[in-house]
Amino acid sequence: MVTPEESTTDSQFDTLRARVRGDLLEPHDDEYEEARQVWNAMVDKHPAAIVRCSGVADVITCVDYARDDDVLLSVKGGGHHVSGSAICDGGLTIDLSRMNGIWIDPESKTARVQAGATWGDVDHETQQFGLATVGGQDPNIGVAGMTLGGGIGWLSRRYGLTVDNLLEVEMVTAQGEFVTANESTHPELFWALRGGGGNFGVVTSFEFQLHDFGPTVLAGSLIYPSEDAIDVARNYRDVMEDAPRELRTLFGLMVLGEESYLPEHLHNRPVAIVISLYAGDPSDGYPIVEPLREFGEPVIDSIKERPYKEFQQAGTSDEPYRVYLRSQYLEQLPEEALEIIVNYFDDAPSWDSSVFISHRGGAETAKPPDVTAYPHRREAFHVLIESRWDDAAADFENMEWVSEFHRALAPHTTGGPAMNFLTSDEPEERVRSAYGENYSKLVAIKDQWDPGNLFRMNQNIPPSDQP
């Protein structure tokens, strides 16, 4: 195992440097500091080396090097995640960000996407052909991490999870082999990669099914004074109970910023917000969103026909913040839970603290829980409690607020979190519950493809002979 002290020697990675085509960065290199950063500024790790891979050959070389020399290995795709597991201390980080090519086949309506691409990259290419797949709600989210964790987005109630639209992957295994996995070739591995995270190898490309979609959608936000929050939440809950699968909405509590498109009297004001997208013909969507629009007296109603790619940009969060969060599923939204949500938000410590609720249904929950490794297929409400802040001195109060909020909601939750929202300090039982009843099958597949647990910098599924 490479230690941080050993990593400073000049010759440590000379052999690897000579074998890769991409840049190998060590702590003394100019671009090292930028390369070790991820979206969550709380993550402060120092790999002994980072290889910005130029292609599959570099990935194979790095995997072989880490395995043969017993070097801790991590894999970084888009770097937009909360846990920070893409970066390791004192080991080797495979950085896929330069491998971000996208190839669209309009005839078959498919896309081949390299693992370093972001969903903003994908939207840009697919919308040129009036096509889309289920991607992230922030253009900076990496394709690889979101896909391997299941994948929920604005189109998922209509078209299913991201993994339901995944046709094939290309991957480097722990033995340095390059394999293809799909429904007919290595089908068990393909099953595991659809929700089992980065536990089985380094995926270098994904093939997705695309759908005729866009370029115009009916989408936007309804913003209400925060004192109307419980009433707005009740209406949101009632509307989503019978909503068609084309309608995806979020209910949230947040503090508005000082964006130029907002009236000045709303700057820095806590509000309740309902964000909606109708994933169908915009003209068909107006009567569907009417029960949301006609409720109460919103201070802003921005629901209108707009470019899908523009709406996807609205969730951009490219600035590095210190971030801490908890996610959970609730089968229902009872009055007691709504009161907890509103009351805790009133005590939020940061101007950028928020809570968002999304209803999971439609195509997301149409399949059995064992059809892919991602197990959360029951209709439910997903609750995401999140705080973002700048000053490290405020770590405790923000983390404690999130944790207390989460504990207060616990009696109403299913106990099964979404894997993509797990933080680095989650207890083992939370990690296991993210995989649900599929966990034992995932362990068996881990035993076959990575018995030495080379790929352990993730929400780990240890092999059966390891604790």
Image (spheres, rainbow, N blue to C red):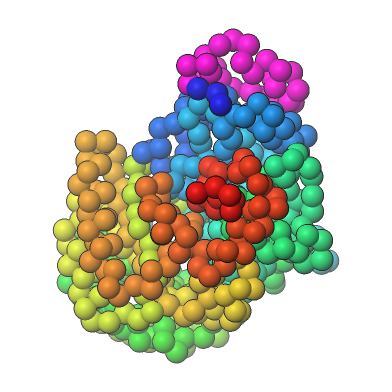
The answer to whether residue 135 is seen in the rendering is no
Q: Is residue 302 magenta?
A: no
Q: Is residue 412 left or right of residue 37?
A: left
Q: Is residue 293 left or right of residue 371?
A: left
Query: In this picture, is 144 found above or below 277?
Result: above
Query: In this picture, is 3 found above or below 56?
Result: above
- Residue at image x 55%, y 23%? 2
The part of the image, by quadrant, that contains residue 39 is top left
The part of the image, by quadrant, that contains residue 42 is top left
Total count of labels: 0
- Residue at image x 68%, y 64%? 191
Q: Position of residue 317 (x, y in %)?
A: 43, 49
Q: Position of residue 210 (x, y in %)?
A: 71, 66
- Residue at image x 75%, y 64%? 187
Question: Is residue 127 or residue 194 the one in the foreground?
Answer: 194
The answer to whether residue 192 is seen in the rendering is yes
Q: Position of residue 395 (x, y in %)?
A: 25, 41
Q: Which residues are magenta?
A: 4-32
Q: Residue furthest top?
A: 10
- Residue at image x 73%, y 44%? 172
Question: Is residue 464 or residue 133 the one in the foreground?
Answer: 464
Question: Is residue 390 or residue 377 the one in the foreground?
Answer: 377
Q: Is residue 10 magenta?
A: yes
Q: Position of residue 461 (x, y in %)?
A: 55, 53
The part of the image, by quadrant, that contains residue 93 is top right
Query: In this picture, is 262 found above or below 460?
Result: below
Question: Is residue 122 or residue 12 the one in the foreground?
Answer: 12
